[in-house]
Image (tube, rainbow, N blue to C red):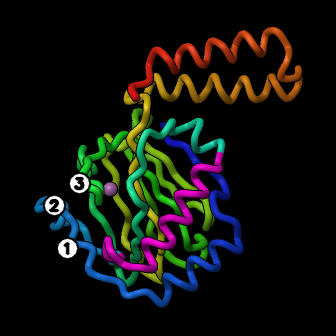
Amino acid sequence: MLLTIDQVLSADEVRQFRAHLDAASWQDGAATAGSVARLVKHNQQLGAQDATGLQLGEHLLRRLGETAHFVSAALPRRIYPPRFNRYAGGGQYGAHVDAAIMQLPGGQSLRTDLSATLFLSEPEEYEGGELEVEDAYGVQSVKLPAGDLLLYPATSLHRVTPVTAGARVAAFFWVESLVEDDRSRTQLYDLDQTIQELSASLGAQDARVLKLTGIYHNLVRRWAVT
Ligand code: NI
């Protein structure tokens, strides 16, 4: 499932993020790519220990935790500390699949179930820079307003097309979900969203809403690995 989560960051927060990031010390992104990805990765990144990146990443993690739509869609068990990248001057990232396992700073590892990109440049600030994701329905080309997030299966082949004018700044991270299977997680998300809609029109105490809510939680109980 490809899913857009609108306004994870407000316009004001995007401005603050950009003020910090536009003055940050960017490094060659190829340094953190594996031997295959290095051949196709042409962008800039903030280092894993960059103080600005760490601070903004923590802010973003807090926002994600407060964003019900994100929690419902991702059912996160663990989230990789967000990193930041920048594409300009023809920069691009050719077709690749993200590594299945990522090392966390504390020495633990994380299985990448979902990949996430939070756009921090407005679409009109740059040319190109589409995130193209191959899913069951073909190639989806995505370019979102600043502050919006794209969630997509980490198993997908994806690429970032060349940025031929302006600069594309984004945050990226991975999610290990409580529910590993993408189809099961998608069904839980659809059920939860439907319950929210029914609850708004029928009331949270409606017997049918309560019954569906029970089914939702019992399916999570069945499918979640904690
Ligand atoms: Ni990737």
| Separation of residues labelled 2 and 3 (CA atoms) | 19 Å
Circle 2: is it few (<14), some (14-19), or many (20+) Cα within 10 Å?
Answer: few
State the image coordinates of residue 91 (x, y, percent, origin top left).
Answer: 33, 76
- The single residue placed furthest to the right in the displayed view is 202
Identify which residue, 180 or 226, lies in the foreground. Answer: 226
Magenta residues span: 46-67
Residue at x 63% of width, y 73% of height: 14
* Dot label at residue 107: 3
Q: Determine whether, in the image, residue 94 is placed left or right of residue 200.
A: left
Circle 1: is it few (<14), some (14-19), or many (20+) Cα within 10 Å?
Answer: few
Position of residue 174 relative to residue 176, above or below, is below
| Mark 2 lies on residue | 34
| Separation of residues labelled 2 and 1 (CA atoms) | 8 Å
Magenta segment main secondary structure:
helix
Q: Mark 2 or mark 3: which is in front?
A: 3
Residue at x 47% of width, y 53% of height: 141
Q: Is residue 57 magenta?
A: yes
Position of residue 66 relative to residue 178, above or below, is below
| Mark 1 lies on residue | 31
Q: Give the amino acid at mark 3.
A: Gly
Identify the image quadrant of residue 137.
Answer: top left
